[in-house]
Amino acid sequence: MGDVLFKVEHVSKSFPGVKVLDDINIELKKGSVHAIVGENGAGKSTFMNIVFGVYQDYEGRLLWEDAPVEFASPLEAQAKGIAMVHQENSLIPYLSVMDNIYLGHYPKKGAFIDRQSLRRQVVKLMEELKIEGLEPETKVNTLSVAQKQLVEIVKALSRDAQLLMLDEPTAALTTKETRCLMDIIETLRQKGVAIIYVSHRLEEVFEIADEISVLRDGCMIVNIPKEKFDYDEVIYHMIGRKLEEYDAAGEDLRDLKNSREILRVEHLSRRNELENISFGARKGEILGFGGLVGAGRSELLEAIFGYDPYTEGEIWIDGEKVSIRSTEDAIRKGLALVPEERKIKGIFPGLSVMENINVASYRELKNGRLISKHKEHASAMKYVEELKIRTTSEMKLVGQLSGGNQQKAILARWLRMKPKVLMLDEPTHGIDIGAKEDIYRIIRTLAASGTTILLISSEMQELIRLSDRIVVMREGKISGVLEKEEISQDSIMHFAMAYGV
């Protein structure tokens, strides 16, 4: 690691009525990856916005190579050599890759854009970063989420950035795409670029970071060098309590061996996606589904729930053969699904927390023909309190809540329906560690009360920690089933990669 490039000294920031950063001190070294972790609301975004020149009214000072600097705007920060890649991409969809990368600082030939030079520079940048499969002339609206993320990174580096800030860069990436990003970060590290890396995924933070700073409630709690990284200790500093306090929610009294089978799927198939899927799940069981991205796990749950019906096979619920051809059929039979893409398929962002919780249950909230406002409010507040949904009011738009609280609102909607089988597809995707632990508690409590859970998670430790058994899928088929005592990361990957299968 090189010399110190950038210092943040005694920086504090307040908004009306609340202090969001309190006496923050950080040193960023050339050729080093500095991870900043913390729950939503810890102050990470505010910190990055100060460094990037979005906020100017703060206490303390910033130093660039030991010289004090002040940025009146992001343009001034960029001119100094600071770049930021936001979680939500800011690309213009109908422009090409190369136009998006150099928009605002095109190479010129006289008064005109030098298109040949533009293309050469983009190709050179992508070669340096070892990015393949991106053509400079391709329109951005035809790219995958991962490719757009790569364009954002190239765009940020097109101004010769010496300090790069990445905000949740892998939130929408597959395992393979994340690996590609890690390789790019390593290339940048070798070039001497200082990197601020913000992520909820501690596994990748531990892999890529040289040091970790933990923020909690706007305060710098601890700075940890790589040689002292410890998973439980980092979580303890992030949430202010140990994981054992969550896990000690109570003794597991379930008797799964003697529980009756609630869900039975036999020979389920759908053309080009699912082939001859058979499994059973017992009352109160958490049945995990492992496999690589694209293995068919989400497609399976969506077929069972009637989003995209199966073409062959049978489904039995509580001993009764059922026909599910729509989501309405599934709901009537006691099935519920919390989808992976909560912003597209889960929440109604323009409706309130109360409306999102009650949207599937309004028949039960009527007095005669009219909805009872008292019942509607009481129903929402019951789940806001039980699931610890952090909101200033049940009337607040759910789109204004953090990802974790949006997910809790979706869970509340289905819990209100008291389903026999609750299917969860990546239930903690993009959620901070504290909210994750709350959702783990909810899942365990539901299982203990007799709800059957089908769980998809790409986070290996989460899948292992929660599941009673794991069905591993590969290319739309079941490649293995692991009992509790057989579950390990190696055994899951054995079947996911089909070693010897």
Image (tube, rainbow, N blue to C red):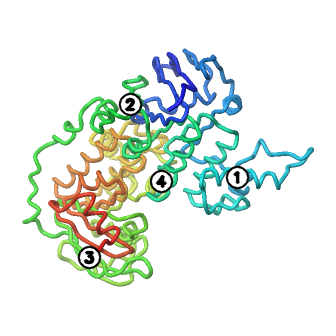
Q: Earlier in the sequence, mark 2 or mark 3?
A: 2
Asked which quadrant contains residue 41, the reply is: top left
Q: CA distance from mark 4 to mark 2?
A: 23 Å
**Marks 3 and 2: in contact by CB < 8 Å?**
no
The reply to whether residue 148 is in sight is: yes
Q: Amino acid at mark 4?
A: Thr
Q: Secondary structure at mark 1?
A: helix
Element carrying mark 2: strand
Reading the image, the residue beneath label 1 is 124
What residue is disc 3 on? 265
- Cα distance, mark 1 to mark 4? 22 Å
Q: Earlier in the sequence, mark 4 or mark 3?
A: 4
Residue type at numbered disc 1? Lys
Question: For mark 4, what is the residue?
Answer: 178
Is there any visible trace of residue 405 in the rendered image? Answer: no
Q: Position of residue 204 (x, y in %)?
A: 41, 46
Q: Residue tagged by mark 2?
A: 225
Q: Which image quadrant is residue 96 in?
A: bottom right
Question: Which is more toward the observer, 354 or 321?
Answer: 321
Residue 221 position, x and y percent, is: 37, 24
Where 60 sits versus 212, above or below?
Answer: above
| Residue that appears at 37% across and 25% down | 222
Q: In percent of the image, x 33 and y 67: which residue is there?
A: 496
**Vertically, is 56 above or below 235?**
above
Front of the two marks 4 and 2:
2
Q: Are marks 4 and 2 in contact (CB under 8 Å)?
A: no
Q: Quadrant of the C terminus?
A: bottom left
